[in-house]
Image: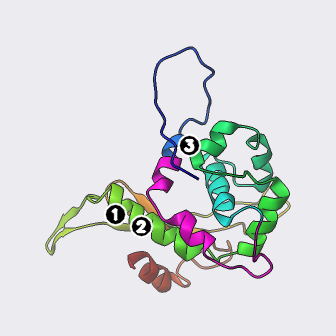
């Protein structure tokens, strides 16, 4: 799908509450995310009718709108701006989105993280530094954020995802979902190595 150029001007047209997706789409255009993801062959999904890139971009659009579940896509399927702004040629239905993400599991994680890091390098080469005795260094902050599920049917443990953020702006570079029962230090050295890489 070709890049879409948006011209912003004053007018009395209908406004959309998700106009920020145009910026997300423009940033994704600066990556090789779609090409790299489409090159991955998944078992049971050799010739998908909807390309992997459309599945991933649609899910990114939902996440950027604060809607982490596949059912939320139904509200956006007939919204042309959602598709155009994200560069999605075919917007999947919620069952298609759910089924493909079930097949994908973690197959695209490395690609998404690498392209995210490359995007930060392209768009924010100066992430901000901290003065130390060793010189100017970029800060890498790591935080475990427990999510409480005590008032749900899922039980009390919930989740305790770990995140790493880079520089003064706090660019998210490495998220990892973890079970709430997992100790915050378990596998942290490997997470730290991956974040630095």
Q: At numbered mark 2, what does the secondary structure look like: helix, strand or loop? A: helix
Few, some or many residues within 10 Å of mark 2 (<14, 14–19, 20+): some
Q: Position of residue 42 (x, y in %)?
A: 72, 79
Q: Looking at the picture, does residue 8 appear above or below residue 133? A: above
Number of the label disc, if any, that sits on residue 117: 2
With 27 as the anchor, is 15 left or right in this view? right
Per the model, the C-alpha gap separating discs 1 and 2 is 6 Å
Few, some or many residues within 10 Å of mark 3 (<14, 14–19, 20+): many
Q: Position of residue 162 (x, y in %)?
A: 54, 69
Question: In terms of depth relative to the viewer, which is nearer, 188 or 171?
Answer: 171
Q: Residue at x 63, y 77 (%)?
A: 40
Q: Looking at the picture, does residue 194 appear above or below residue 81? A: below
Q: Position of residue 72 (x, y in %)?
A: 76, 47
Q: Quadrant of residue 98?
A: bottom right
Question: In terms of depth relative to the viewer, which is nearer, 178 or 99?
Answer: 99
Q: At numbered mark 1, what does the secondary structure look like: helix, strand or loop? A: helix
Q: Which residue is mark 3?
A: 21
Q: Is residue 34 magenta?
A: yes
Question: Is the C-beta separation of discs 3 and 1 under 8 Å?
Answer: no
Q: Looking at the picture, does residue 43 appear above or below residue 70? A: below
- Pick the quarter of the image with the C terminus: bottom left
With 133 as the anchor, is 21 left or right in this view? right
Q: Which residues are magenta?
A: 24-48
Q: Residue at x 48, y 39 (%)?
A: 5
Per the model, the C-alpha gap separating discs 3 and 1 is 21 Å
Question: Is the C-beta separation of discs 1 and 2 under 8 Å?
Answer: yes
Can residue 187 be seen by looking at this rendering?
yes
Q: Colour scheme in the image?
A: rainbow
Sequence-first tag of 3 and 2: 3
Number of the label disc, if any, that sits on residue 121: 1
Number of the label disc, if any, that sits on residue 22: none
Sequence-first tag of 3 and 1: 3
């Amino acid at each position: 799908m070709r890049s879409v150029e948006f011209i912003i001007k004053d007018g009395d047209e209908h406004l959309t509450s998700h106009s920020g997706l145009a910026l997300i789409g423009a940033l994704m255009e600066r990556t090789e995310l779609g090409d790299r993801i489409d090159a991955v062959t998944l078992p049971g999904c050799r010739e998908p009718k909807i390309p992997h890139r459309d599945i991933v971009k649609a899910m990114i659009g939902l996440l950027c709108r604060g809607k982490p579940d596949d059912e939320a896509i139904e509200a956006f399927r007939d919204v042309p701006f959602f598709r155009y702004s994200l560069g999605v040629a075919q917007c999947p239905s919620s069952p298609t989105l759910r089924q493909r993400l079930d097949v994908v599991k973690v197959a695209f994680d490395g690609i998404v993280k690498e392209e995210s890091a490359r995007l930060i390098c392209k768009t924010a080469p100066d992430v901000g530094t901290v003065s130390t005795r060793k010189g100017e260094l970029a800060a890498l902050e790591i935080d475990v954020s427990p999510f409480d599920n005590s008032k749900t049917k899922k039980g009390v443990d919930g989740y305790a995802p770990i995140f790493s953020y880079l520089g003064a702006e706090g660019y998210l570079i490495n998220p990892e979902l973890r079970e709430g029962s997992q100790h915050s230090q378990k596998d942290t050295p490997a997470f730290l190595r991956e974040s630095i890489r």
